[in-house]
Structure formats: structure tokens, C-alpha cells
Amino acid sequence: MYSAPAFETKICPPDELAARVATLPRPLVFTNGCFDILHRGHVTYLGQARALGAAMVVALNSDASVRRQGKGDDRPINTLADRLAVMAALGCVDLVTWFDEDTPLNTILACQPDVLVKGGDWAPERIVGAPETLARGGSVHSIPFEHLRSTTALLEKIRRL
């Protein structure tokens, strides 16, 4: 008989998010992204983000949301279900959810994070949810890239081979 891996309990449907977040220790870190093909840059960034708090929620763009970002007709490569499972398996992630909108603002408002984080290509003043997080007394961080990697560049390399 199949038994789902324990990490899958970290996957949280959006309609259960507020209740599940209420059980997490504070300060709570929030970040989001596509995380289509997980690479070293992603996991380094996620580990650094998690170090800023006692728990971390990661929100993934739904497949439709990724397609609207203009990353390419074949994106995402991995389905939302697969991306959720991979993200949930990471030890630094306490809860993973998803959003279908173009931005994660509603998800951020549901989580009420103490710490809002994005990668170094986002200036803090451009991070969605920054004004709301700062107004509640939280902090907003843009973590510089330590390993210059991108899913787009990785896919280009694969296609060349």
C-alpha cells in the first residue's frame, strides 16, 4: 500500500493557508517564485531566506501564472504538483502553497509574514507586499545572488546539447 512521504504534509492549499500559518513559529519568512527547475542558486537563496526567521512559507506560481510571465511557451517544465513536492522536500521549507494570480499579494496578506524576501534581482521597493509588510512592522530583504544560475539559462544549455 502506498503511503505519501511525510514532506507532502507541508503542501498547503491556499484556502487552508491562514489556519496553517497560525501554527508556525514566528518570525515568519515568506518568499515566492516559479522554482521550475530547482538549482543551486535556488537552494542557496532559500537557505539564506530561512535563516532570517523561525519558519518559512514558500508560495509557487501556478502553471497558468508562470505562463503569463512570458518565460517561454514551454514553461513551466515541471507541473505545479511536481514543483510543490520538490519544494516541500527541502528541510528549510516549513510550508509550501501556490497562487494563480500574477502576483502573490493576496497570499502575502493571508500569511502576514514578519520577513518578506526575494532574490537579488528585486530591489526591496519593487517587492510585491513590501509596503504592507513594512506597515505591520516587518522587514523586507533582497538577497544577493551567490551562485549565478537561472532556469532559463539551464534550459538554453540543454537545448544546445
Image: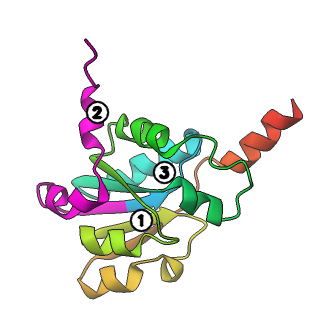
> Which quadrant of the view contains residue 144?
bottom right
Instruction: Find numbered disc 2 in the image and state the secondary structure of the residue it sits on.
Output: helix
- Amino acid type at circle 3 is Tyr
Of the pair 106 and 139, the residue shown nearer to us: 106
Q: Quadrant of residue 37?
A: top right
Q: Earlier in the sequence, mark 2 or mark 3?
A: 2
Q: Position of residue 159 (x, y in %)?
A: 83, 36
Residue 82 placement (x, y as % from top left): 48, 37
* Closest to the observer, 20 or 94: 20
Highlighted magenta segment, given as a residue range: 1-30
41 left or right of 81 in image? right
Residue to which mark 1 is pinned: 117
Which of the two residues, 76 or 92, is positioned nearer the viewer here? Answer: 76
Q: For mark 1, give the secondary structure.
A: strand
Which residue matches tag 3?
A: 45
Q: Residues within 10 Å of mark 1 (few under 14, many from 20)?
A: many
| Location of the N terminus (image quadrant) | top left
Measured from the top left, where is residue 88 in percent x and y? 35, 39
Element marked by disc 3: helix
Residues at marks 3 and 1, CA–CA distance in whole angstroms: 10 Å
Q: Name the kind of residue labelled 1 in the image.
A: Val
Q: List x then y, in percent, for residue 26.
A: 16, 61
Q: Are marks 2 and 3 in contact (CB under 8 Å)?
A: no
Earlier residue among tags 2 and 1: 2
Vertical side of 33 occupied by 39: above or below: above
